[in-house]
Amino acid sequence: MSVKLTTRQVGDVTVIDVSGRITLGEGSSVIRDEIHSLTDKGNKKVLLNLGDVTYIDSSGIGELVSGYTTMTNAGGTMKLLSLTKRVKDLLQITKLYTVFDVHEDEAHAVRSFA
């Protein structure tokens, strides 16, 4: 199964629910395209919900960093929500866990944008 994105608004925060596999190819380009689309529309607050991600490879990690950079350069903020153990471990191994603002609770994460 490849990656599937569902985008929804919670107040002024855009939540992207990600499910499936974020891997080299389609999985990573879908996220990149969505982040670019949101920044083009002027969305400055993005919460990436990774709770249903079953697998992520180094290319997927690169896409998270790319999305973060794109949002930051556009004057926005991208935060992560509900990391699976695998994603959390990969971010810690690559020392990227400290780069991202990571939350476990969606309501708390949305409030943190204020």
Image (cartoon, grey):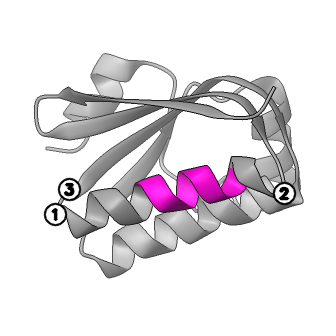
Q: Which residue is at 34% across, 31% downward?
A: 109
Mark 3 vs mark 1, CA separation in Å: 4 Å
64 vs 37, nearest the viewer: 37
**Where residue 42 is drawn, which disc sits there?**
1
Residue that label 3 marks: 43
Residue flagged by tag 2: what amino acid is it? Leu
| Amino acid at pointer 1 | Gly
Picture coordinates of residue 34, whole percent (x, y): 44, 53
Numbered mark located on residue 24 in the image: 2
Q: Residues within 10 Å of mark 3 (few under 14, many from 20)?
A: some
Give the class, few, some or many, for how many residues have Cα within 10 Å of label 1's Cα (few <14, many ≥20).
Answer: few
Residue drawn where x is 30% and y is 56% of the image: 38
Task: Determine which of the numbered discs, if any, sits on residue 114 in the image.
Answer: none
- Rendered position, 51 above or below 79: above
Write down the region rendered in magenta: 28-34
Indicate which disc, 1 or 2, sits on the residue closer to the N terminus. 2
Report if the CB atoms under discs 1 and 2 are less than 8 Å apart: no
Q: What separation in Å lies between label 3 and label 2 (alpha carbons)?
A: 26 Å
Left or right: where does residue 12 sit relative to residue 34? left
Q: Amino acid at mark 3?
A: Asn
Q: Across the whole image, how many numbered discs are drawn on residues?
A: 3
Residue 13, percent from left and from top: 21, 39
Residue 29 sits inside the magenta stretch:
yes
The answer to whether the residues at label 3 and label 1 have Cβ atoms under 8 Å apart is yes
Whole-percent x and y of residue 47?
A: 39, 40
Mark 1–mark 2 distance (CA, rounded to whole Å): 27 Å
